[in-house]
Image (cartoon, helix red, strand yellow):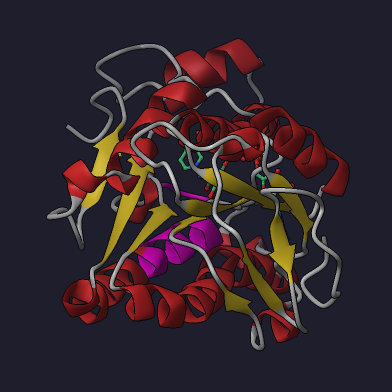
Amino acid sequence: MNANETVPPAGPGAARVTGIGSVTGEVRGAGGRPADGGLAGKRALVTGGAGGLGAATARALAAQGAYVIVADRDGAGAAAVAAEVGGEAWEVDLLDTAALETLKLDVDILVNNAGIQSISPIEDFDPAAFRRILTIMLEAPFLLIRAALPHMYEQNYGRIINMSSIHGLRASSFKSAYVAAKHGLEGLSKVTAREGGGHGVTSNCVNPGYVRTPLVEGQVADQARTHGIPEEQVVAEVMLANSAIKRLIEPEEIAALVAWLASDQAAMVTGSSYVMDGGWTA
Ligand SMILES: NC(=O)c1ccc[n+]([C@@H]2O[C@H](COP(=O)([O-])OP(=O)(O)OC[C@H]3O[C@@H](n4cnc5c(N)ncnc54)[C@H](O)[C@@H]3O)[C@@H](O)[C@H]2O)c1
C-alpha cells in the first residue's frame, strides 16, 4: 500500500487506508481472526518489516495477537511477511520524508526499525550517504512518531519502540553516520517518553549487538574488504572481539524483547534503552 493512495478495505477484519496520507482501520487479530494473545486488539506498524529484525518483530507481535502493518521499500518482501502474519503491507520509501509529513497513523504500537549501514573513515565518508542514513534512521522515526502520537494520545495508550543498537550507546570507527543516527534516536526516544508519559504512551529503545541478518552479512563483507581479512575472521575477531558470548544474536531473541516492551507488563518502562548484546558493552 502507498500512504498517498486511497484503497478499499482488503476484506473483513483488514485494516484500511482512508484519505490522503492516513493509515487507519478496524482492529482485529492476525489473519483477520479475533486476536487471542497479550496484544489482542492492538494494531502495530513495523518499519523495515520485510526482512531481518523487522520480519522477526512482525512475527512476534502477530503471535501475541496484534494486527501488523509491515512497512518497507521492498514491497514484495513486505507483502510476503504480511501474508504470513495475517497483516498488511505498506510499500513506502522512508527517504520520501515529504510524504511522511502529512501522514496520520492510527496504530497502537509503532516499531521504528528500518535501517541501513555505510562504513568509511570520516574524511572519505560520502555526504549523500551520511544524509541518507540520518533521514531513514532519525528523521523518518521522528515523522512517524509525530504521525502516531495524536491517535495514541486520544486513546491514552501507545507503545513506541525504536530499534537502536549498541551503537546508540557506544561508538565504533568508520560508522560516523550510523552511530550519529542511533545516538540521535536515543535522544528522540527519551523526549517522546517525557512528552508521552502523561498520555499513556511509552517510548523505549532496543539495543542489539550483532544479529544474524542481511544487514550484518553486508557489514561482514564490507569490513573484510576494509581490513583485508577473511569474513570468518571479521565475525570472530572484529565484531565479537568484545563480546562475552561468541555468537551472533538471533533475530527472534530481539523480537521477543520488542514484544515484551509492547505488552501491558512493560507499562512502567519508558525512556529506557534495553541492551541485548551478549556482553559486548560490559
Ligand atoms: N543486524 C544487527 O546486527 C543489528 C544490530 C543493532 C541494530 N540493528 C538495527 O536493526 C534494524 C534492522 O536491521 P536488520 O539487521 O534487520 O537490517 P536488514 O537490512 O535485514 O533489514 C532492514 C530493512 O529496512 C528496509 N529499508 C531500508 N531502507 C528503507 C527505506 N528507505 N524505506 C523503507 N524501508 C527501508 C529494508 O528494505 C529491509 O527490509 C536497523 O535499524 C539496524 O540498525 C541491527
Residue sitting farthest toward the left: 268
Classify 231 as above or below 96: above
Relative image position of residue 52 (x, y in whole percent): 62, 32
**Magenta-colored stretch includes residue 247:** no
Q: Quadrant of residue 255?
A: top left
Query: Percent x, y for residue 97?
Result: 69, 80
| Residue 277 located left or right of residue 53 | left
Depth check: give the residue in front, 13 or 95: 13
Q: Is residue 270 above or below residue 60?
A: below
- For this view, does 54 lie left or right of residue 238? right
The reply to whether residue 227 is visible in this rendering is no
Predominant secondary structure, magenta span: helix
Taking 231 as reference, is 191 above or below it?
A: below
Count the numbered circles shown. 0
Residue 88 position within the rendered picture, expressed as x and y whole percent measured from the top left: 72, 48
Residue 177 lies in what quarter of the image? bottom right
Question: Residue at 72% across / 63% down in the picture?
Answer: 16
Q: In this image, 135 relative to 245: left or right?
A: right
Residue shown at 23%/77% (left/top)?
A: 199
Q: Report the quarter where the N terminus lies.
A: bottom right
- The part of the image, by quadrant, that contains residue 32 is top right
The quarter of the rendering in which ligand 1 is drawn is top right
Q: Which residues are magenta?
A: 172-185
Residue 51 in view (yes/no): yes
Q: Residue at x 47, y 73 (%)?
A: 145
Instruction: Point out residue 201 in the picture as x, y percentages from the top left corner.
Output: 28, 68
